[in-house]
Amino acid sequence: MFRTLFAASFLLIISACQSQPDPLIISADTVVDKLNTKVSQLKVTDKRSYSYLYRHKKEEDKAAFAPTLRPLTLVVEEALQPVTGAYDENGLTWYVTIEKALIDATLHTVKYELEHSITIRVEATRGNRRYSNFYSGTYNSTGGLKPAQATLERQFKQLLNSVLTEIANDPKLRMREQEDF
């Protein structure tokens, strides 16, 4: 009887570890704009060659994937809204490109390892002047058994907030109208 119960509970745990992940609910806090120069236009695109955010490596050539519930472009655009102002034809335009956004998970028998990584490229233009830079961050974590979906979402949100705050408060992206070089 004990063996049967033990075997059944072991199979239940193993099958729970191998279930397909649900789409992730990703959000970001709106950034605090500490600079005076506003952005006239904000254009956000996703240049990743994949549409998922979470990749769970199972074997050498196998993996499970989970997308986001809302597109990352909308999440980033909403978070950067405080830096925008009234539209001006000769104003400052930001082209924000999501180059990489990924949560890589490796599950072992009794623990997991997560690597969150984000790379965002921002090109600021005003008239014939341009400035671009890459902003990136990584976050690694480990835990027991299988990561909870809330853990994945919370850790990715923290990393995304950090990268977006760095973007919003970079004075080089706020090209003033009359700058001397």
Image: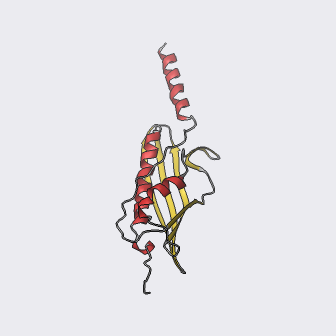
Query: In the displayed image of the protein, which residue is found farthest to the bottom?
Result: 181
Q: How many marks?
A: 0
Residue 180 visible? The answer is yes
Q: Quadrant of the C terminus?
A: bottom left
- Which residue occupies 43% across, 55% down? 159
User: Of 12 and 7, which appears nearest the observer?
Assistant: 12
The picture places residue 2, in percent across and down from the top left corner, at 47, 15
Percent of width and height locating residue 66: 57, 44
**Colour setting:** secondary structure
- Which residue is more in the foreground, 4 or 83? 83
Tell me the residue at 52%/45% (across/down): 106
Farthest residue toward the left? 34
**From the viewer's perspective, is residue 113 above or below residue 86?**
above
Does 4 sit above or below residue 75?
above
Q: Residue furthest right?
A: 61
Query: Compared to 177, does 164 lie above or below?
Result: above
Foreground of the two, 174 or 47: 174
Q: Indicate whether 177 appears above or below 38.
A: below
- The residue sitting at 44% across, 64% down in the picture is 84
Asked if one can make out residue 147 in the rendered structure from this viewpoint, the answer is no
Q: Residue at x 62, y 47 (%)?
A: 60
Residue 27: % across, % down: 46, 49
Q: Is residue 169 left or right of residue 46?
A: left
Q: Residue 48, percent across and down? A: 60, 58
